[in-house]
Structure formats: C-alpha cells, structure tokens
Amino acid sequence: MSDAALRIGIDLGGTKIAACALEGDREIGRRRVPTPQGDYAATVEALCSLVESLERDIGRTGTVGIGHPGSVSPRTGLHRNANSTCLNGHDLCGDIARRLGRDVRCANDADCLALSEAADGAGAGARCVFAVILGTGVGGGIVVDGRVISGPSRIGGEWGHNPMTGEPDAELRARPCYCGRCGCIEQFLSGPAIEAEYARTAGRALPLAGIAAQGTDPNARAAIDRMIGRLGRALAVVCNIVDPDAIVLGGGVSNMADLYTRLPDAIAAHVFGDAFATPVRQARFGDASGGRGAARLWDAPRGA
C-alpha cells in the first residue's frame, strides 16, 4: 500500500537522473545516476531502479512523479520533442508504470522546476512563475496559482524552440536543431551551444564553468556578453506575452553570477512597456528542484 505522505520525484536529465523523496516539504532521501546515452530500455530501467532503491532505503513505498524532457502527444500518447531523442516515439510514462506496477505521473522537466520553485523555492509567493531550464537543453514552464499551464497541445512554456530573435538569417540557418528547425533558442543558449560557440571563436575548448571563470579572456567575456544579450531578448518575448511575477532560472547555465546583475536590464531593453520590475532569481533548490517538482505532481492541481 502506498504511503500518501511519501512522494518520490525523479528528474530525467540529459547527463544525469536525480531522484528525491519528500515528506511534506522535507527531503528524506536522494540518489542520482548517469543517464544511459541513447538507450531507451536502459533509461526506463535506471528510472525504476532509482525508485526501488530509494524505497528500500526509506522502508516503504510512495507515489512516483517523473520530470522529463519533451512532452507527450495528446494525439498518440507517445513521447515527442525530447532532446534525449531515444525517448521519442515511446510511451515513457506507461512503460515506467508497467515496470513499477503502479500509477505514475509525468510532466515536462521545466514544468516540474516551475512547480517546485513556485511552491517553496525562489518563486514562492508569486502568482505567476516562469521557470527556465538552461542546461543540456533549454525549456520553460509556467505555473499560475500553483497550477502548471501545459495547454491542450501539451506545449505550454516550450520557449526553447521559438526562433532566436535579433540574429541574422545566416546565423539562424547555421544552427540546425534536433527538432528539425533551425535557429531555435536552444541552439544559442544551452550549455553545449555556448561551449561550441566559444570553441569556434577561441580555437580551444572549455567547459561552461571554465568560460564563466575566465575573467581576463576576451573570448570568454564576449561569449558571456552574447549569451546575456540573447537571453534578455528571448525572455522579453515571454514577458510581453505572460508578464510573470517572477522568473526563475535553473540548469547549469544558471550558475553564472553575472546573470542576476545584468539580465534584468537586458530584458528591460526589449519589453513593451515603460517599466520592468519582474525579479530574476536562481532556483533555490538547484539541480534538486526538478525532482522536488516531480514529487509534487501528486499534490498540485492538474494543469490546464
């Protein structure tokens, strides 16, 4: 019998799978493993094994929520649009439920980030929260009054696959995306995209953290300047449509300290209004936030 007080949430990322167990707001367990690359069956097994190992540690079973890249097609019921492309075309949530022998709730990983941070994180107290994942991929989630807004097509918040504004057509065409389009925001603002652009400019490779730390390197400074300008333009589009009460950033790119001093002005330069007061905050729970939000899928009102 499932203990209603125990909520297990798993965040399926491009490089890692992180699981946590909550009782109320208190985290009582955590585990993580590398994400099997390009192997759907191994990914399902890794997700289920994390649930089972947490439950063994705690000594009882709980509800299970999964935060994943991409979304589920309302037409076919199958996974689509995930940058972890091995998931696409499969019944991920159904396969996990069958393997575990119980109901499982699933949602986009950025939706889970938004739900977590709106509940008791950096967006707590805000009526409308737009949460952004800037990591292996780029995504967004919208929570209004504690409810995830996913929409009838299940694409609410999928801001990372809008075209990047303010770039020349040749630059957009030069950035093909796994989704089949060119010039998506993800191809400019994801961690791998920033690293690749730095390598092309500087003639050497650096990981994202190294780029952020290279204060005297003109190529690193230029890469960060470009990233902040682009992120400001991209988020201004969201603000002109949704006008959120708080913007919360998660993912590896969100660890750049410059974002929180410079990004508000970069957004304000492009919003349609004479004032911009929306706070931009780093996710309170860092890379644990997606799992915490997935655990909360059993308590949150179902999305619109």
Image (spheres, rainbow, N blue to C red):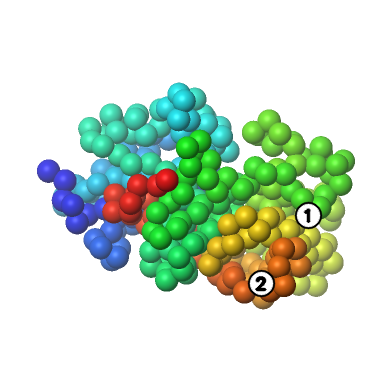
Numbered circle sitting on residue 276: 2
Work out whether residue 95 or residue 18 is closer to the camera in this orientation and state it: 95
Q: Quadrant of residue 259?
A: bottom right
Instruction: Tell me, yes or no, if residue 227 can be seen here.
Output: no
Count the numbered circles shown. 2
Work out whether residue 256 or residue 72 is closer to the camera in this orientation and state it: 72
Amino acid type indicated by mark 1:
Tyr
Image quadrant where one finds the C terminus: top left
In the rendering, at what x and y percent does residue 294 appear?
A: 37, 50
In the rendering, at what x and y percent does residue 128 appear?
A: 49, 62
In the rendering, at what x and y percent does residue 48 appear?
A: 32, 38
Q: Quadrant of residue 30?
A: bottom left
The reply to whether dot 1 and dot 2 touch (C-beta < 8 Å) is: no
Residue drawn 51% across the image and 52% down it: 141
Residue sitting at the far front:
273
Q: CA distance from mark 1 to mark 2?
A: 31 Å
